[in-house]
Amino acid sequence: MELIVLGCYGGYPTDDTGTSAYLLKSGHFNLLLDAGSYSLLTLEKHVDPLELDAVLLSHYHHDHIADLGVLQFTRLLKRDKNGNRAHLLPIYCHDEDEQRYQEMTLENVSEGIAYNHDKKIAIGPFDVYHMKTLHPVPCYAFKIIERESGKCLVFTADSGYMEKFSEFAEGADCLLADSNFYRGMENHSVHMTAKECGVIAEKAGINQLILTHLPQTGNHADLVEQAEEYAPETKVKLAEKNKNYII
């Protein structure tokens, strides 16, 4: 299983890097995990948007879905080298916001599929579990398991710190975690600090922690240091645009 970061800032893009979006690859299967701003152009460096097999969305804040509309239009208008249009794209999302949910379906282009009514869903080679997070709008974290290898990625999406993250992420091979804040902003109701991400990683026995949804200001190296302080046995890394992480 391979994780490619397409965007890693929270809120808004800066320094030629977009907001939350990730490409998860297993064999020839391509899953887009969130679709933040600037993600479509970055995606093209790795795979043709027509070759996406599915999209999985944590929530409907703009920094996680900004490029979704243009992705739909790309698949509506663009043709492959043989003149064929792309297959109907499944977009897995929650239906707690009815208006946004309806926008996920575009005739002959994409179909919104609600995941929040089932404990587990299957997306291609992956089994996906979800957990509701602490955020101002309905938002879900994911546990994504590659069936063939058993490898597991947990994505916190956007959330304030919750004790149950440690249980949800227990034994995962990689934790992709919201670390939008530096030390001193703990117990926030919207996002986590790097320290809190480290606490989760330590309690859950995580081998690899990738800090994402990064702030636009400050020294990101401090985030790594603050997470490492609370997860000394974990390899802590910053999410970086276009970087590949093997899980």
Image (cartoon, grey):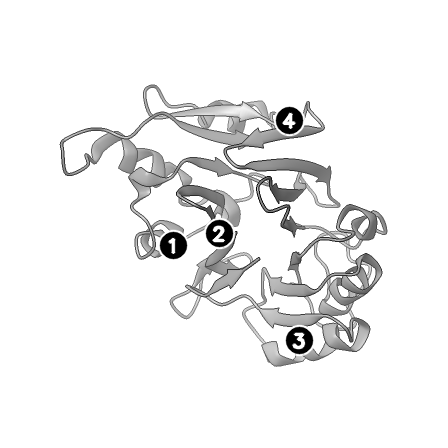
Is residue 157 visible in the rendered structure shown here? no
Reading the image, the residue beneath label 3 is 224
The x, y position of residue 117, in whole percent, is 68, 23
Viewer-proximal residue, 170 or 98? 170
Is residue 125 visible in the rendered structure shown here? yes
Q: Which amino acid does label 3 sit on?
A: Val
Q: Is residue 16 left or right of residue 79?
A: right
Q: How far apart are marks 4 and 2 (CA)?
A: 21 Å
Q: What residue type is labelled 1?
A: Tyr
Q: How far apart are marks 3 and 2 (CA)?
A: 20 Å
Reading the image, the residue beneath label 4 is 96
- Tell me which residue sits at (49%, 55%) in the image: 2
The x, y position of residue 247, in whole percent, is 57, 57
Mark whose residue sits in front, 4 or 3: 3
Q: Distance between the residues labelled 3 and 1?
A: 25 Å
Vertical relation: 161 (above or below) 131: below
Reading the image, the residue beneath label 1 is 38
The x, y position of residue 231, in whole percent, is 78, 71
Dividing the picture into quarters, in which one does residue 60 lie?
top right
Give the farthest residue toward the left: 82
Q: How crowded is mark 4: few (under 14 residues within 10 Å), some or many (20 or more)?
A: some
Give the farthest residue toward the front: 148
Tell me the SS state at disc 1: loop
**Mark 3 in CB contact with mark 2 (< 8 angstroms):** no
Mark whose residue sits in front, 4 or 2: 2
Question: Reading the chain from its start, which is encountered first: label 3 or label 1?
Answer: 1
Q: How crowded is mark 1: few (under 14 residues within 10 Å), some or many (20 or more)?
A: many
Q: Which amino acid does label 4 sit on?
A: Glu
Q: How far apart are marks 4 and 3 (CA)?
A: 35 Å
**Mark 2 in CB contact with mark 1 (< 8 angstroms):** yes
- Tell me which residue sits at (77%, 52%) in the image: 189
